[in-house]
Amino acid sequence: MKVVCIGSGYVGTVTGAAFSALGHRTTVIDIDSDKVDLINSGNSPIFEPGLESLIPQMVYRQILSASTSFEEIFDADVVFIAVGTPSLADGTVDLKYVKSAARSIAEHLNREQFTVIVDKSTVPVGTSELVASIIEEISGLRTNEHFAVVSNPEFLREGFALEDVLFPDRIVIGTDHPGARTVMRELYRNLIERTHYDELSKRVAFKMNMQAPKAVYFETDAKSAEMTKYASNAFLAIKISYINEVARLCETLGANVLDVAKGIGLDSRIGDKFLQVSSGWSGSCFPKDTAELLETSRKYGSDLLVVEAAVHSNLRMHINCVDKIKRQLKTLNGKNIGILGLTFKPNTDDARNTQASYIIDKLIALGANVSVHDPKGMEMFAKINGHLPIRYCPEAEDVAERADAIVLITHWEEYAALDWERVRTKMRTPYLLDTRNFWSRQRLSESGFRYEGMGI
Ligand code: UDX
């Protein structure tokens, strides 16, 4: 099959690389020629574990390529729309890139063959119909006759994106069109049946989890597939907000949230995932998706009060971290705070919309001087938060210089083994706030630190 993927961001690049690994001739299209050149020279335009080894192999074998030309669509069997979906000021999704991709598809469709267009980006319920109507209007071709639009939401987590695409729990296909369903089944056949996995495992750098259960292939209508994505992300956000609130109460009552989360998670109806306490969830998906879902629910008079509460509770969790530091240091005015981790979670360079930016903003407003470090996210963070007066440190331990507090926001593995003796000597006040319960209280207390975790 020939697959075209419009967009070379997180979703498009990973999707393109994964389908090429599954044996489909794949072209990623992007209007940004720098990104296209990067892929064609065997490099990844984004940081995502595994891509650095997979992309060059696929490009060398001429099964993966990139292009700025939409003419690639002409002989494609499947065209993925994997463009960005930024938020508008009211929280709803700006579909300008999706609409522009639909127009480009309409202009380049082959009238002689049936083409399946797939919405991979997270888009509001009803977008498949919108995309179909744009294509019909511009091309004069009829939907479900010359082409069909399918919703196939991505469920990939940044940092584990390739793993999530190649070992998904489920593949959700939203279309009522029988021909499109057949094409999608064929597209995913290697994944569903687990054929060619030996060969595939040689191509990806990470260890293939051959024991992982097979993906459940689930077919439904387009609107239900679109809704599934929003409802899933909102549910996960609720789960984290809930355990974070429980953590605050545990702290007050003297219980240990690590044990409580374990105890809750042992119930198979609940499960043990997404019960890790933090300074709150963030990133480019949960905040955006909950905002869109909430706006839509309000618009149709069907308010999702539980989601609203989770969003509210999440902001309180960010503020709670600032309050904790303030309580320890009495005032933040003139205090030096070191921040470890700027990305919304480890193993990604994505520094958009992070807990760190919210917390740092508040610390600076209260008069603190902030020094930061992140192994991958400093460049993006600085670009987005250029207005914030921050000292960017090349080494993690540099944030300790005359610091009154070090706050761990993102639990990058390299922060596990800092030279604690050196860190403590550099600090003015040896206070550590570990928002991920990542370090050992016992070990750090023994090393002379005043250690605070979350809910423990
Ligand atoms: C999410 C969904 O998981 C994925 O299925 C969807 O396709 C895209 O959105 P992602 O945004 O990459 O993926 O990150 P995720 O791993 O879900 O984490 C989101 C935020 O929640 C991060 O800030 C993370 O640190 C936080 N988190 C996650 C917690 O605080 N506790 C947890 O137990 C899990």
Image (spheres, rainbow, N blue to C red):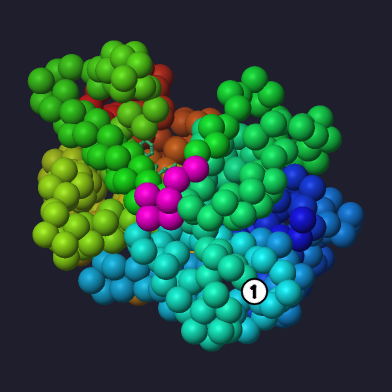
Count of marks placed on residues: 1
Residue 455 appears anywhere in the view:
yes
Instruction: Single out the residue that lies furthest toward the right.
Output: 61
Q: Is residue 244 above or below residue 287?
A: above
Q: Could you tell me which residue is drawn at 48 percent across and 68 percent down?
A: 84
Along the viewing direction, whichever of 201 and 442 lies nearer the viewer:
201
Q: Could you tell me which residue is drawn at 61 percent across and 76 percent down?
A: 105
Along the viewing direction, whichever of 261 and 203 lies nearer the viewer:
203
Q: Secondary structure at mark 1?
A: loop
Residue to which mark 1 is pinned = 30
Q: Position of residue 352 (x, y in %)?
A: 42, 61
Along the viewing direction, whichever of 52 and 8 lies nearer the viewer:
8
User: For ligand 1, which image quadrant applies?
Assistant: top left
Q: Which residues are magenta?
A: 219-224
Q: Position of residue 260 (x, y in %)?
A: 25, 17
Residue 285 appears anywhere in the view:
no
Quadrant location of the N terminus in the rendered image:
bottom right
Kind of residue at badge 1: Asp
Q: Could you tell me which residue is drawn at 23 percent across and 62 percent down?
A: 296
Is residue 221 covered in magenta? yes
Quadrant location of the C terminus in the rendered image:
top left
